[in-house]
Image: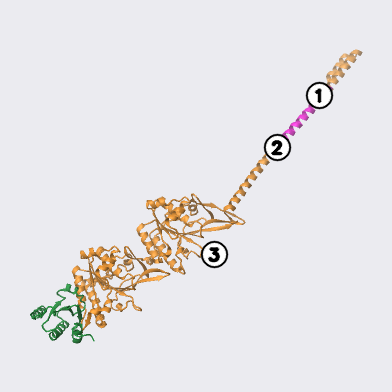
Chain colours: A orange, B green
Amino acid sequence: MKKTKKKIFNNILPKSPTGIQGFDEITAGGLPKGRPTLVCGGAGCGKTLFGIEFLVRGATQFNESGVFMSFEETNEELTTNVASLGFDLDDLIKNKKIALDHVHIERSEIEETGEYDLEGLFVRLGYAIDSIGAKRVVLDTIESLFAGLPNQLILRAELRRLFRWLKEKGVTAIITGERGDETFTRQGLEEYVSDCVIMLDHRVTEQTSTRRLRIVKYRGSMHGTNEYPFLIDENGFSVLPVTSLGLMHNVSDERVLSGIKVLDEMLEGKGYYRGSTILVSGTAGVGKTSIAAHFAEAACKRGERVLFFCFEESPSQLMRNMLSIGINLKTWVQKGLLQFQATRPTFYGLEMHLATTHKLVNDFKPNIVIMDPINTFVVGDKDLEVKTMLIRIVDFLKANQITALFTSLTDNHSAIENTDVGISSIIDTWLLLRDIELNGERNRGMYVLKSRGMANSNQIREFILTNHGVELREVYVGASGVLTGSARIAQEALENAEVLTRKQDIERKKREIERKRKTLKSQIAAMNASFEAEESEVNKMIKTEQDMIKQLEQDKIEMAASRNADKENSKTKILKK
Amino acid sequence: MRQSAVNSVIKRIEENPVATEKDKWVLRLYVAGNTPKALTAFANLTKICEEQLMGKYSIEVIDLLINPQLSVEYQILAIPTLVRKLPVPVRKIIGDLSDTERVLIGLDLLPAS
């Protein structure tokens, strides 16, 4: 005994793990070992279940048997009720892992005739504990005794003794209590059980109910102080220790392709970072889901697992629609790489969404999570709560190195940056899709609003949905703004025409110069010809002249000869000439 | 000592001649150890029975410290508890039986006022 006490002093408070998902994390190990814990809450908030799961998990996971003393439900009712959660109590009872004891007290059968105590209860409990060597005890709900026994003074004194006795026995006990008006329990049990108090709550806001758990106090131990949403499903209790997540997650340098080539190029040619959070926002019908579908398809082609939450369309509708742009998601669903989860956001509360997200992610272990769209969560004035929830989801996904892509519908009438439920600060890569109305047409444009940690393109691209997927085109920025659609086509035509004209111009000029050259040549030829003609004329004339001169000479000679002039003289003269 | 006291009690009760089956009163007193309260209750009970049910009753004393499993049958929580097994209906009277009037009411020997 002394030894254990010393151990307690030296080490931290020993704890008894509950095995309840998430609960041991927020209490750093479970309930205080060997001490009673008060679990209180209103009707139907899961007190009994908390207790029974504590015992069942103790018996099956930690080899600690337990006693369940019920003051309300009979053993048969209890066994049937928890069978729906997959707990086989009969089997555990047979193996002496769990003992059920139904304590029933009827006021009308009882006559009080003097002094008494509750030793009978002690004996029963002690007997049950000893018969199976129990380490855990649940008393559910001991306050029922107040209805059965008239003398409150004796009862209170005996309860105080009971809790002390439980401590002495060294069993870890859970005492449940109905929530009172201003106190934690109706009969003020917190006066007696003050080591650890856990409050369960079942709240309805905006017609959706949420279960929450809060650790009111926990002597001698650190614990999370927030209200944690919890879930009761076919596997029992699960508490979400989400708010305990921080900004301590590791980051990856790895990149994942978006499935759209041009978009990858806009992001340094490598796509998104793995484990980052991507937001695709835009007005109605701009193709947000298509971008998401591309991303999903690309991931599946790489053999990665994708979890697709759709909050607006049914999976089959989404698959049909995506088929129209050439994305066949069905094959990936059949291969088990893609899983759809379709629920209406209003189907249950935010915490429940958070809880199901957690559960599905833990079960499916995806590389990529897509939520389409996130802003449908916003019903009424719950912006802040939605933001908190999304931060929790983002933190959770980041901690698990899961790339998340959210789509968000923005209102036509409000500023684009304001409408995304105020989560821009937690987004790493933000793609903005917007419609551009021009010349009686509505076209889509896309740009990267921000992308942390990369030199992204700042260009606006025209976003076109074709039968083979999304295409991003360069857009024309002219004097009248960004040109898209037919205006862009007109502009293209205009430019093509201009080029053609220029080409024709050049051709024309070339031809002209050719013609000029030809003209010049012909002129030269003509001039040559006339020159030649002239020349030949001149030559002819010269010849005639020479002939005439010769003739004259001849005539002279002949005349001289006829006159018998000096032959020698006349001959010389003719030669000189 | 406690053991012997209880045994002697049972013995003495069995010595009592039972009148007829119809009128037979079967009483059971649950105690947990030989506590002052248990002794007071037993003394009070025998006194009342001798006065009211002379010769047609039997008392069984059950010590839960020896037989804890017997507490389940009649849902015994309070100690001491007196159970009237016969005649039916079953009645339970808790406390040390010092309030004789309430005991008589509880046993249906006096009409409730």
Residues behind callouts 2 and 3 on a single chain: yes
Looking at numbered disc 2 in the image, what kind of residue is underneath it? Arg
Please state the horizontal and vertical placement of residue A263, each as a whole percent of the image: 49, 53
Residue A448 seen in the current view:
no
Q: Name the residue under label 2.
A: A515
**Residue B12 within the magenta-colored segment of the rendering:** no
Quadrant of the rendering where the N terminus of chain A is positioned = bottom left
**Nearer mark to the viewer, of 1 and 3:** 3
Q: Distance of mark 2 from mark 1, alpha carbons?
A: 36 Å
Please state the horizontal and vertical placement of residue B61, each as a whole percent of the image: 14, 78
Q: In which quarter of the image is residue A312?
A: bottom left
Please state the horizontal and vertical placement of residue B78, each as a whole percent of the image: 21, 79
Could you tell me which chain the residue with mark 3 belongs to? A
**Nearer mark to the viewer, of 2 and 1:** 2
Could you tell me which chain the residue with mark 2 belongs to? A
Residues behind callouts 1 and 3 on a single chain: yes
Q: Mark 3 points at which residue?
A: A413
Local crowd at mark 2 within 10 Å, few (<14), some, or many (≥20)? few
Check the image and report above or below for A322 versus A12: above
Local crowd at mark 1 within 10 Å, few (<14), some, or many (≥20)? few
User: Left or right: where does residue A125 sit relative to residue A369?
Assistant: left
